[in-house]
Amino acid sequence: MGNRGMEELIPLVNRLQDALSSVGESASLHLPQIAVVGGQSAGKSSVLENFVGSMFHLSSEKLIQFLLNLTLVDLPGITKVPVGDQPADIEYQVRDMIMQYICKENCLILAVTPANTDLANSDALKLAKDVDPQGLRTIGVITKLDLMDAGTNAREILENRLLPLRRGYIGVVNRSQKDIDGKKDIQEALEAEKKFFLSHLAYKHMAQTMGTPYLQRILNQQLTNHIRDTLPAFRSHLQSQLLALNKEAEEYGQFNPDDPARRTKTLLKLVQRLAVDFEKLIEGSGDKVDTVNLSGGARINRIFHERFPYELVKIESDERKLRREINYAIRNIHGVRTGLFTPDMAFEAIVKKQISRLQDPCTKFIDLVTQELVTTTQQCINKLSSFPKLRDETERIVTSEIREHESRCRDQVLLLIDIQLAYINTKHEDFIGFTNSFADPVTVSFLPTLLSAVQVIRKGWLTISNIGIMKGGAREYWFILSAESLSWFKDDEEKEKKYMLPLDNLKLRDVEKGFMSSKFVFAIFNTELRNVYKDYKCLELACNSQEELDSWKASLLRAGVYPERVGNGTPENFTDPQLERQVETIRNLVDSYMSIIYKTVRDLMPKTIMHLMINSVKEFISSELLAQLYALGECSVLMDESPEQQQHRVEVLSKHAALKEALAVIGEISTSTCTTPLPPPVDSSWIQPSRYTQ
C-alpha cells in the first residue's frame, strides 16, 4: 500500500481538473513543489520514496502507475569539499541549484537533518531560513533516529521544545543500505518504522505524530489547503461565465430543431425582436447606446436638419447669372415695346425656374434617407444570421418594401414641387409684394436660426491652419459656435478663452486640400474685407474628415454664416436705368418669395419622409413582415440553422452544463475538505544564517 492520503487526493484533484478542462479553463492547479534539502547521505531520496509510496522508477522500466501532476525535487546533497573530479566550486554550484528551487513561494521545503548530527548547525535549516525566515513553508525532518548513540534520543527536538520550528519536526526511519540490498520493499519498511516508534521509550508517546505516514498526512493536508485556496477564484470566474451564458443557453434550450411547433414559435419571437430593435434604433431608445458613432435615427436626424439645408444653400444661383436671367426675361416679355411697368410674368418665370431647381436636392435627400434606412434595417436583420434563409428572405422582403415606399415618397415630393409651380401665391403674408420691393435689397435668410444669443449650436476641435505657420505649425483649439459668435478656447475645459469672433458679415468658402495634407479645410472671411482675427483677412479651419467638415458647414449655416457666392461681384452694367430698377425690383421679390418656398420645403420634406417611408416601414415590419414570411409556405425551411450556428448552439449548451457541473464539483470539494490553520510563530533565532548570506 502506498500513500493512502495521496490516493484519496488523486480522484479529488482529477474531478476538479476534468471539470475545469471541460469548460476550457487551464486544468493546471499549479500544485506546490516539494523540495528535499539536506546534506549528503541525510536520507533525502528515501524520504521522497516513502512519501510517494513507491521507489523511484528507473529509465529502463516502463511506468504504469500515474500520480498527481506534482513536482517532487530530490536536490543534491549539500557538500563542502570537492571529491574526485568535482569542480573546486562544487559547494557554490550545489547551493545555487538548491536556491533556485526553494526560493519560490510555491515550494514546500523538507529540511532533512540526520539525528546523529548537530541540529543547530544544520545546513538544510540555515538555507531554509534564508528564503523562508517566518518558517511558513519549512518542515523539519529528522532521519536516522535508529542510528543514534546508545543512551541518546531526539525527544526534545521532536517535541519542538529544543531548537523549535514553526511547523515543528517529524521523525522518520528509512531503509538502510542493507535493507535496500535485501530487496526490502516500502511497505515492510513502513511496518518496521511503525514498530520502532511504538517500542521506543522516548518516542512511543508521540508515535501518532511520527513516521512516514504522518509526514504524508501533513504534506497531503498542505496540498489540500492549496487546492482550497484556489477554489474561490475559480468559483468566481466560473460563476461570471455561467451568468453571461444563462440567457443564451435558455434561448437555445427552448429551440428544438426537430420540433415544427418550436420552429414556428422561434420564428415569431425573432420577427418580434426585429421589429423592436428597428424601432429602438429609429426612435433612439436602444438598450445599448453607441458613444463612438451616430447610428439609425440620429443619422437620419442629421440629414433632416444639417445635410438637407446645406444642399439647399448649394443650389443658390450666382448673383450675376440671376440678374442676367431677370434682365432677359423682362426684355423678352416686353418684346418690341418699351415697358413702363415691371412685368409679373418675368417674376413668375424666374421663381418657377428657381423652384424647379429644388428637384435635385430633394431627390438626393430621399436617396440619403433611404440609404440610412436600408443600413439600419440590415443592422437589425444581421442578428438573424443564425438562420441564413430567414435572414435572406427577410432582407429581400424588407428592402423591397423600402424601395416601394421610396418610389411613393419620391412621387409625393415631386408632386409638392409641382404644387408650388402650379400657383405663385403673391398674397402670402410673408411676401413683401411690389409695394415694398423698391426698398433696399433685403438679405433674406431662408434658414432662420431663431436661436437665442447664448444657445450653443456646436462644439468641437478644429485646427487653425493659417495662423501658426510662422510659429511652428498649425494649432488645435476647442471651438464653440453660438447664434451670434464663434469662440475658441485652449482646451475642452473652456477655461482659457483665446478669442470670440462675431458672426456679422461673415461667409465661408471651401479651401482646396493640400497635396500632403490629410485635413479638410474651410475658410471664414468678412464680406466687407475687414480683418477677421488680428491681422488676418480670413480664418482657415481644418477638420479630420469630410463628414466633420459637412457638419461644421451645416452648423454655421444654422448660425447664418452662408457659403460664398461664386462670382458675386458688381451686377451687369445695364445701359437702361429703368430696366435696372425693374431688375432690382424682381430680384428682391424673388428673394422674398423663395424664402417662403425654402421654409415650406424644409418643413414638409422631413414630414413627408417620416410619414411615407420611415413610419410605413416601421409599421410593415411590426405587422406585415411575419404574414409575408408565412405566405412563403416554407417556415420549417426558413428556420434551418447554419452549420456554424448549430455548432455554436451545441457548444453553448455543453459549456453551460459543464460550468454547472464544475461549480457543483467545487461545492463538493469545499464541503468535503477542510483547511488546517497555520501554527503560531516560534522563536527561530537559534538558526544562524548560512555562511552564503553572511
Image (cartoon, helix red, strand yellow):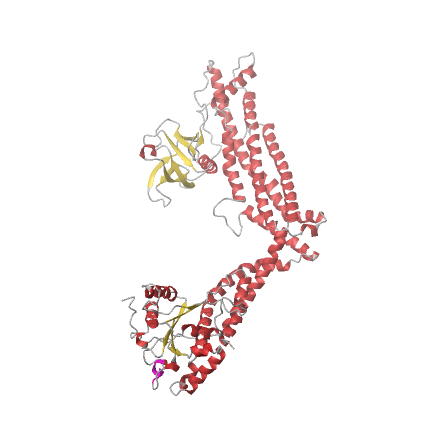
Residue depicted at 45% across the width and 31% down the height: 562
> Is residue 229 in view?
yes
Q: Kindly identify the residue that appears in the image at 60 percent across and 55 percent down.
A: 648
Count of residue discs: 0
Q: Does residue 133 appear in the picture of this structure?
A: no
Was residue 155 drawn as part of the magenta stretch in this picture? yes
Q: Position of residue 674 (x, y in %)?
A: 47, 74
- When asked about the image quadrant of residue 83, the answer is bottom left
In the rendered image, the residue lying farthest to the top is 336
Q: Is residue 188 above or below residue 531?
A: below
Task: Using the image, determine if residue 225 lies above or below residue 357.
Answer: below
For the magenta stretch, what is the residue range? 152-157
In the displayed structure, does residue 398 sit left or right of residue 315? right
Among all residues in the image, which is located at the extreme left? 694
Taking depth in this image into account, of 210 and 186 the one nearest to the observer is 186
Magenta run includes residue 682 = no
Residue 24 point in image, percent of width and height: 53, 60
Outermost residue to the right: 633
Q: Quadrant of the C terminus?
A: bottom left
Viewer-proximal residue among 220 and 641: 220
Relative to 88, 216 lies left or right: right
Q: Position of residue 441 (x, y in %)?
A: 45, 25
- Nearest the eye: 73 or 413: 73
Question: Which of the 4 image quarters holds residue 345?
Answer: top right
Question: Where does residue 444 sit, x and y in percent of width and height?
Answer: 47, 30
